Image (tube, rainbow, N blue to C red):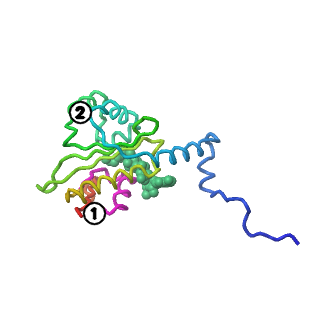
Amino acid sequence: MPQVLSRPRFPSVSVPALSRLRGQHPLAGLRAAWRRASVAVQPVLRLDARDATDLVDHYMALDPSDRGARFNSVAARETLERRYSDLDWDTSRVLGIRSGGRLVAVAEIAVSDLGGLPCRELAVSVLGPWQRAGLGERLVRRAIRGVCEHEHLPLVLYTRASNVSMVRLCARLGARGETLYGDHVAVFDPA
Ligand SMILES: CC(C)(COP(=O)(O)OP(=O)(O)OC[C@H]1O[C@@H](n2cnc3c(N)ncnc32)[C@H](O)[C@@H]1OP(=O)(O)O)[C@@H](O)C(=O)NCCC(=O)NCCS
């Protein structure tokens, strides 16, 4: 008697996964999976003045809405070139993850103050095709380690309350969050 199996013998593919593939190139899902796997093993690098051009290229490659979310302004190339050619790379720490030489994820940690007390301010950006692969989380975790655990200072991130990905990421990693008039501030307390 053939055995009746309640489950298929082959690995099942979830319905949301199939619907995401619908309307895309048949290899799009595989490419995205490959991208995720390949960046997972790339190290987090400390960037310096030699990386300034790559950094500007990274910001210009963000979707305009993502660049707007990152800088809270349109941020034209000339403005960014001026900003990063003048940056004090010792005071500001810039971390990056590369894929095939290209900077695909960046975190900037700047000197700042919170209620008159010293703190560090964090800003993060990940290029669209590499988003939702855990890179944002890796960079925020690295910043928390450097600032909250080693410097024993608060780490602060400002964004719009409508930036659901960023607000949720900060909350998941333990930030206290406060929203006022559509602006959100997330604070990671020192360890
Ligand atoms: C906000 C931002 C930095 C998040 O970066 P990211 O690399 O996509 O972040 P992560 O991948 O760590 O997490 C994002 C989501 O992907 C999910 N994710 C992580 N790894 C995943 C994987 N392998 N497969 C599927 N989903 C995954 C996370 O669970 C998270 O889900 P949620 O939003 O539903 O909670 C990115 O969207 C961005 O650059 N935005 C524009 C700039 C900006 O807004 N910066 C913030 C102000 S400074």
Q: Specify the quadrant that holds the N terminus.
A: bottom right
> Which x, y percent locates residue 142?
32, 53
Residue 173 located within the stretch drawn in magenta: yes
Label 1 and label 2: CA atoms lie apart by 30 Å
Type of the residue with mark 1: Arg
Q: Vertical placement of 23 versus 114: above or below?
A: above
Q: Is residue 136 left or right of residue 157?
A: right
Q: Single out the mark in the foreground, 1 or 2.
A: 2
Residue 69 shows up from this direction = no
Magenta segment boundaries in residue numbering: 155-174
Q: In which quadrant of the rendered view does residue 118 lie? A: bottom left
Q: Which mark is residue 11?
A: none
* Rendering quarter of residue 71: top left
Q: Pinpoint residue 129: horizontal percent, then vertical percent.
A: 48, 42
Q: Which residue is mark 1?
A: 176
Residue at the spot x=12%, y=56% of the render? 117
Return the residue at label 2: 83
The answer to which image quadrant residue 52 occupies is top left
What percent of the width, then of the height, locates residue 174?
32, 63
For residue 42, above or below residue 141: above
Query: Which residue is situated farthest in the left direction here?
Result: 116
Residue 5, visible in the rendered structure: yes
